[in-house]
Image (tube, helix red, strand yellow):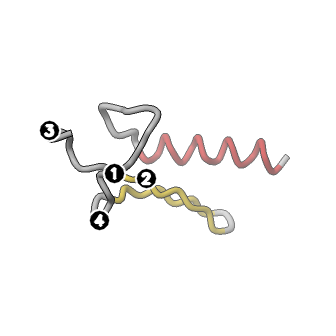
Amino acid sequence: MKDDNEPIGIVLARDKDEILVEYATGGISNQLFVSRYQLYLPDPEVLKQELRRLLEVNDG
């Protein structure tokens, strides 16, 4: 829509024992279709903790 802000992507990556959480703000198309919007950006540390938890569950 005309009044929408630019989209923000979240990059989640894992390399051995290191987890990276970054926000990507440039060059993302406005033609994105999403199922859920959030009005705030989650804290990167919270995302890292959740990613660690999910990886532990999947790695068994």
Q: Amino acid at mark 3?
A: Asp
Tally of numbered tags? 4
Q: Are marks 3 and 1 in contact (CB under 8 Å)?
A: no
Which numbered disc flags the more N-terminal residue, 1 or 2?
A: 2
Residue assigned mark 1: 31
Name above or below for residue 29 compared with residue 57.
Answer: below
Q: Are marks 1 and 2 in contact (CB under 8 Å)?
A: no
Q: Are marks 2 and 3 in contact (CB under 8 Å)?
A: no
User: How packed is label 1: few (under 14 Cα within 10 Å), some, or many (20 or more)?
Assistant: few
Residue assigned mark 2: 10
Which numbered disc flags the more N-terminal residue, 3 or 1?
A: 3
Element type at marker 2? strand
Say which mark, if any, is on residue 3: 3
Element type at marker 1? loop
Image position, residue 13 (x, y; %): 56, 61
Residue assigned mark 4: 27
